[in-house]
Amino acid sequence: MNQFTEAAVARNPAAVQLLGLCPLLAVSNTVANALGLAVASTVVLTGSAVLVSAVRKLIPEDVRLPCFVLVIATFTTLVNLAMEAYAFDLYQRIALFVQIIVTNCMILARIEQVASKEGLGRTFVDALGTSAGFAAAILILGAAREALTVGFPLAALPPGAFLVAGLLLAGVNAVGARTRRARDGATARLPRP
Amino acid sequence: MRPLLRNVAALAVLTLVAGVGLAWFAQVTEDQVARNRLEAETRILRELIGVEPGAGDHKGRPYGALGNADLVLCERDLVVLRADGSGYGGAFRLAVALDLDGSIQGVRVLKHAETPGFGDILKAPSSWLDSFTTDDVHAVTGATITSEAVMAAVKRAVQMVRLEDMCPP
């Protein structure tokens, strides 16, 4: 499995690692909002990861976390300003959730684990893969909630986010467990590390 | 001592670069953001009082944004007041349309910072905002601070305005 699909599918930030769930639940009420947040998260994650990777040898070990957070906060603010200027309708609907991308642990995790250690190429692919995985999760959830609203109005409201997301995660886990069983065959009973 | 200096230097340089970058980009987007806000406010006012773009009030002021002054449309028997207040999430600004007898024709929220979800009663179309045109306005369960602050701001604006001076015969 190549690095992109590993980041997007096998280590999917939302479905497998359960990271970034706050925006995932809050902004998935329509596909348009979900797409807006997916694009914003992609820009912040990719931009911050590539920048950190480029200057990783200049960042002292002791203060690396403040440096990473500063870079993420800067990119988040840039995206927020760009959205306010060039996509004002979307900004009015999801601005709050764009602003809290800065606290998304999915982004800090990729920077700490990959961008601060690896070169530009690997960092870029990993960031794009993780973003694609997050975008897929939020778009599927958004589409499911918008479709279900017709017969099930609760789907568009906050409790609907928990219900639909829970069912989707259960489905993903069931598929994942089956894939592992099929792959591992007789060794499946061994405890996993 | 040297690691400390290195840490301070790294943080200082990074902060400086980030600050300069953000200041530059804020300046680039400033005008467009102001245009967007004015446009959004104009759209809300148009919906509230049904005036076409380009129209002005009786002093010839374009009606667009309320700015710091109220909007007076004598020939249409209408005054739009700006009302500021502070809710759960911070400052908000309202536009309150009155006829010259002082009865409320409509209330719209021009900007607010209330919690998403709880602030939904402020988003037109809202039966709660429409209830201001009757005498029967109540606080909303679950958004008590927000709704009471809006009611207080509307009340203050309506009590302070001197309608008899607005359109002298």
Image: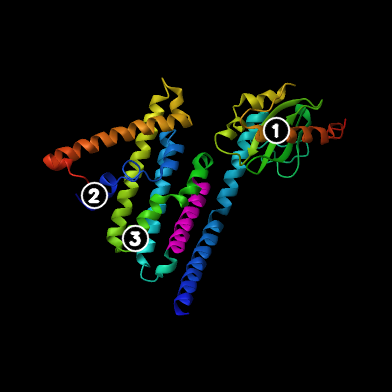
Dividing the picture into quadrants, the one containing residue B125 is: top right
Q: Which residue is drawn at 19% across and 40% down?
A: A180
Residue type at numbered disc 2: Pro
Q: Within 10 Å of the Cα at label 3, are there few (<14), some (14-19), or many (20+) other Cα atoms?
A: many
Which stretch did the figure color magenta? A65-87
Task: Identify the residue shown where x is 46% and y is 59%.
Answer: A69
Q: Is residue B81 left or right of residue A56?
A: right
Most extreme residue toward the left, as rendered? A186
The quarter in which the C terminus of chain B is drawn is: top right
Image coordinates for residue B156, horizontal then vertical, percent:
78, 35
- Residue placed most toward the observer, A84 or B159: B159
With B39 as the anchor, is A151 left or right in this view? Answer: left
Give the answer, above or below, for where A59 lies relative to B70.
below
Q: Identify which amino acid the numbered label 3 is placed on.
A: Ala
* Pointer 1 residue: B148
User: Mark 2 against mark 1, which lies toward the viewer?
Assistant: 2
Residue A3 seen: yes
In 3D space, how far apart are the residues under numbered discs 3 and 1 (Cα atoms)?
49 Å
Dot 2: chain letter = A
Q: Where is residue A50 in the image (x, y as percent from the top left)?
A: 36, 60
Tell which tag, 2 or 3, sits nearer the viewer. Answer: 2
User: Disc 2 on helix, strand or loop?
Assistant: loop
For label 2, the residue is A193
Q: Nearer the viewer, residue A183 or B84?
A: A183
What is the crowding at mark 1: few (fewer than 14 residues within 10 Å), some, or many (at least 20)? some
Q: Look at mark 3 in the image and give the residue it sits on.
A: A115
Q: What element carries label 1?
A: helix
